[in-house]
Amino acid sequence: MTNDTSISGPRPLYNAAQVRELDRTAIEAVGIPGYTLMTRAGEGCWACLRTGWPTVRAIAVVCGTGNNGGDGFVIARLALAAGLRVVVLQLGAADRIRGDALLAREAYVAAGGVIAAFTPGALEGVDVIVDALLGTGLGRPPEGEWCAAIEAINQTPAPVLAVDIPSGLQADTGAVAGVAVRAARTVTFIGRKAGLYTGQGPDYAGEVIFSDLELPREVYQRVVPMAQLQSWPLPGVLDRPRLRTAHKGQHGHVLVIGGDYGMAGAVRLAGEAALRTGAGLVTLATRPEHAAVLAAACPELMSHGVTGVLDLKPLLLRATVVVIGPGLGQSAWARSLLAAVLEAGQPRVIDADALNLLAGEPVRADYQVLTPHPGEAGRLLGITAAAVQADRFTAAQAISDRYGGTAVLKGAGTVVSSSGQLPSVCTAGNPGMATAGMGDVLSGVIAGLLGQGLDPPAAAVAGVCLHGCAGDRAVATGERGMTARDVIAELRAVLNTARVCA
């Protein structure tokens, strides 16, 4: 079994239908009995339970009527054999249990196990609750006794181990329609479910442990995943040392445009992030009133006051990469600068208010990275932020399809989508990064990587992972009070080490 915060390199993500196909292939094409897979799943959960809560004395296993419940019966039987007090609670009609799940239930009963109907009071006094209710078979929001059971589980102080996926969480999207179990740990099998890593998934899944149940490689070769989980470091990204004869002109000249009145700090953050990511030169184009102050605050940044397009054009001619949006605002000044950037045609990162302006007058281009949060993504697509969050993969792909280039849909489990490529998800980062300026830093990081020769899809994925990993280093002294500048301070160390961040 693998803890997904301890390994690097891309890992495939699957939707529920694809995992069912993997399961079917293992059983029918490879000849692994379904009950063998169920037993392995239960054994994996049991091992995870013992390592996570080594002093546990009593557990409650809440079982549904499908294979997820069958896994729960295996766990209950193993706990019983280990001398624990085991409470097994059944939801749904027992006569609906079939196949391998029925075999697991009968094996538990034959070992002396007792099964009772679910009541909230039966959860009292246990050390751990095992959620084996619904698995990936959920097709609609939990209702009736299922909804009541999930609410009761969440109201119980005992930690929860979820079997395969927390009940109520959508395996494909990470959305929660109604209620879902909040787990401390989730052991997921055969294929990593995409919904565990984005949307509301990280809040509900807790620590995710993966087991392939010893499926041979040939099974996975038959199913193309829906996405991939990425982490830092990414193999092949800036892993060659610079030449001894290198000079600043070889590492990109990033132009950051923005900083309307009262928002000068945004362009400074993006510019400093680009420098700390390795850009050779960084120029800021901002309101004239801000230029001198920014130059004094960070002399490595070349700060220019621009009153309009005529002032901007010479800067555009010298730049190899453009960032537009940090602190840009939506004034006539902002609109004119964005129009000039869209016409100029350099590789670009479009962020913040530039995205809101672009939503009003869509322009398609291929060599760009768009970095919306859910609200901005909703404006780009003409839908609500809630609709974006309900299916982040579809929303990110729709932005890429409509506007061209690469879409970076920010949030827990940031999704990166480019036409013709598997979407990527990065789970690095933490709640301390939910503060002003973090998006400005990300735009600068991605631009710095573009300036060093990465194409937009690669720069977007690497930038998201680098940014998140820097945030995870910065969180060492606590989440509350973290600032964007704390993350900038960690970029250089992360960029030059092989530290793994999920």
Image (spheres, helix red, strand yellow):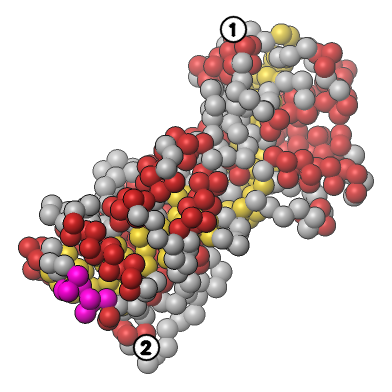
**Residue 331 point in image, percent of width and height:** 19, 53
Q: Nearer the viewer, residue 242 or 172?
A: 172
**Residue 428 point in image, percent of width and height:** 47, 51
**Residue 260 point in image, percent of width and height:** 16, 56
Q: Is residue 84 left or right of residue 349?
A: right
Amino acid type, label 2: Ala
What mark, if any, has residue 261 been given in the picture?
none
Sequence-wise first label, 2 or 1: 1
Q: Secondary structure at mark 1?
A: helix
Residue 240 in view (yes/no)? yes
Position of residue 196 relative to residue 319, above or below, is above
Q: How many neighbours does mark 1 have within 10 angstroms: few (below 14), some (14-19), or many (20 or more)?
A: few
Q: Residue at x 87, y 19 (%)?
A: 106
Amino acid type, label 1: Gly
Residue identified by numbered label 2: 246
Q: Is residue 355 left or right of residue 288?
A: right
Residue identified by numbered label 1: 121
Q: Which residues are magenta?
A: 309-316
Position of residue 82 relative to residue 172, above or below, is above
